[in-house]
Image: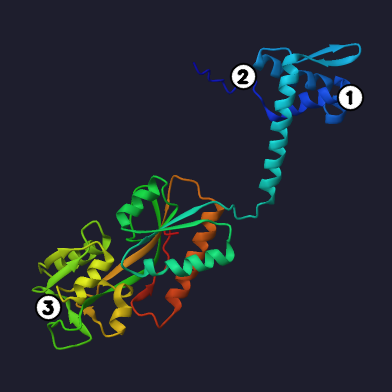
Amino acid sequence: MTVHKDHHVPSLDPRKLLYFLTAVDCGSYARAARELGVSQSTLSEHVSSLELYLGRPLLTRGQAGVSVTEAGKMLYRHAQLIVRQVRQAEQDVTKVSSVAFSPVSLGLATYGAASTLALPILRRVMERCPDVLLRINDNFAGTLSDSLINGRIDLAVVYGAGPIKGVRLRSLFAEELFLFASESATIPGPARSSVVLSDLAGMRLLLPSNIHFLRNVIEAAFTRIGVSPQIAVEIDSFSSLRDALRANLGVSILPRAAFAEAAAQDRMQMLQIRQPRLEAVVSLGTSEQLPVTDSVRAVEGIILELVGELTADGMRSGIRALAHTPGSA
């Protein structure tokens, strides 16, 4: 049967062990007390506390000084190791810089600018915090939020401004959504650079499933204009959606970062959506309950720095900086 010691009962406190060791090494309570800078009564109380906890006499006092019992000799060997390890732990901890180097798990929402931040974040963390083990996971906002709450990840760049129970969100930027289609697809309307949302009513849409925040933004926009979208397929795989678009199986509505490179190489059309213009807010999430380590704060600072550079870059269309509101940080 396991015996659980009460916290108020004397225990193997490293300080008490140090007092015991010093008493044995000095051979007398008087000399040990002087070396430790404490009174003899304090030293005696600590040793008595150990004896009470262990249920064995450890030291006996006589005219010739202190003698060690068999139980005391056994404890002496263990105590030397314990005190040495405690001292080493103190030294190791004080050597660590202000950034406590521990693993940091980062979740990035799929399909948009959040996922494109992965490489810049990784590079900057490796440059500035080489001892931080960064773990990156691409997933959907709902899944990442759950992972934040239960502690599986420390940070997440997700779509949505909340509120999400148990998650603290800081709005980063707004990302415009565009229409993507094969270069051979016929798009309704006279313009080749933009399209009115209502013109997409009869087109086959290839969209993420409703677990993705983007899907909610898209469906809400169609509802506002009184149009029922024709959703042909739900695809949560980035590569599968890209292949389906190139095969002209339908069109999709996604952030510019999703397929901007393919569109620039004339393998895909990218058209701005008008009336209404569609945007999705991207936020940085952390858990409201779990403690934030210095390593997490360091990675968070790098993310905010990169987002500032991203939103300041006028060449990146489709990204709009957001003014931080009270409580957003």
Quadrant assignment, res 132: bottom right
- Separation of disc 1 and disc 2 at Cα? 28 Å
Q: Are marks 1 and 2 in contact (CB under 8 Å)?
A: no
Question: Which one is closest to the eye, mark 1 or mark 3?
Answer: 1
Which secondary structure lies at badge 2?
A: loop
Amino acid carrying mark 1 in the image: Arg
Please report the residue visible at 46 percent of the width from the left and 45 percent of the height from the top.
Answer: 290
Q: Position of residue 98 (x, y in %)?
A: 63, 55
- Separation of disc 3 and disc 2 at Cα? 76 Å
State the residue position of label 1.
Answer: 31
**Relative depth, front residue between 281 and 179:** 179
Please report the residue visible at 23 percent of the width from the left and 68 percent of the height from the top.
Answer: 241
- Separation of disc 1 and disc 3 at Cα? 93 Å
Amino acid carrying mark 2 in the image: Val
Where is the C terminus found, in terms of image quarters? bottom left
Quadrant assignment, res 119: bottom left
Amino acid carrying mark 3 in the image: Asp
| Residue 16 in view (yes/no) | no
Position of 3 with respect to 143 (left or right) is: right
Which secondary structure lies at badge 1?
A: helix
Q: Position of residue 181 (x, y in %)?
A: 20, 78
**Relative depth, front residue between 299 and 122:** 122
Identify whether 153 is placed above or below 194: above
Please report the residue visible at 64 percent of the width from the left and 22 percent of the height from the top.
Answer: 11
State the residue position of label 3.
Answer: 199
Q: Earlier in the sequence, mark 3 or mark 2?
A: 2
**Relative depth, front residue between 320 and 297:** 297
